[in-house]
Image (tube, rainbow, N blue to C red):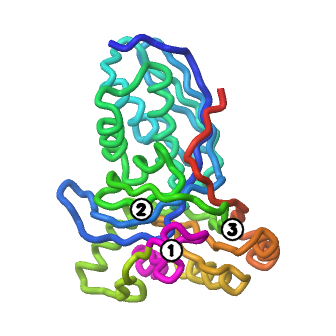
Amino acid sequence: MPQEKRSDMKIRVFAKINLSLRILGRLEGGYHSLETIFQNVSVADQLTIRTTPGKIDVRCDDPAVPDGPENIAYRAAAACLQILDIRDRGVEVTIEKRIPVGGGLGGGSADAAGVIVACEHLFGEIPGGDTSRYALAASLGADVPFLLSGGRALAWGIGERMLWLPVKKLTPLLLVVPHLSISTSWAYRALDNAQAEGLSTETMDINGGALKWEELIGAMGPTEVMINDFEPVIFAHHPELREIKHRLIEAGANVALLSGSGSGIFGLFEDKKKRDAAVSVIDPQNEYYLIKANFLNRSYDILE
């Protein structure tokens, strides 16, 4: 059984966007095969993790986030303690939530990845190294393996297989997140139902073409084939999101796309001046969260 190395730590965990997202099929056990390009962005939650005598406790300052076993950070902690064979210790996780909930920005997954990193710092490395670490992360969610290291990666399978890509420019972006939370499980069900009914509209009709290396590592990713398969079904239920995407393009974004399963839409800009100029015209009536951010080459910072 590993010995406790320290009693507490703080970690800042960063959000992600999907520069492309294709759902290739449904697998056994409710999982889906996907192909996506993950990119970290400079929006962050802060976690404080402390060791406790024999229990797991997760608390968040956002009432929309569950505190107990329904929280993915709780499940990450439980999985880590089990694989580390720690029976007489627990962890207390306090989450200062700044990544909007239900926006497709991977906030819950980032918290889970942060807990895995913290548990290893507090108790010792997971037996089996990266193989076991990433398998554990994949069991929690498709975004979690990427968020253990971050930057940019082409991922496929259920998110556990990745090709790490260089981040050559900290491209500025504007995130537009409505006061609307979209459940990932609902989005997958809606996509499955649409495909089962033979509905193929908008991006579902588009193959997207071959991914080129020059685009994968480019400042904005593969802008010519930047596709999210969730857009048709989510836009059908929430047409205001389609309007946000169009508004970002009209405001000067080189490309705009739904991130993950939504509801956040991001626009990528050539420079900060153009991004900042778009803020005033995107949301004059303060209907949305507007978040100025930029690409990052990592998924977390250990603070102390």
The answer to whether residue 67 is magenta is: no
| Alpha carbon distance from label 3 to label 1 | 21 Å
Q: Residue at position x 55%, y 61% from top?
A: 103
What is the CA distance from the residue labelled 2 to the residue labelled 1? 12 Å
Q: Quadrant of residue 249?
A: bottom right
- Say whether disc 3 or disc 2 marks the residue closer to the N-terminus: 2
Q: Which mark is residue 143?
A: none
Give the class, few, some or many, for how many residues have Cα within 10 Å of label 2's Cα (few <14, many ≥20): many
**For residue 278, above or below residue 135:** below
Cα–Cα span, label 3 and label 2: 22 Å
Marks 3 and 2 close (CB-CB < 8 Å): no
Residue occupied by mark 3? 174
Asked if residue 224 is among those painted magenta in the image, a careful observer would answer yes
Residue 196 against residue 64 in the figure, above or below: below
In terms of image quadrants, where is residue 140? top left
Q: Quick one: quadrant of the C terminus? A: top right
What segment is highlighted magenta in the picture? 213-237
Q: Nearer the viewer, mark 3 or mark 1?
A: 1
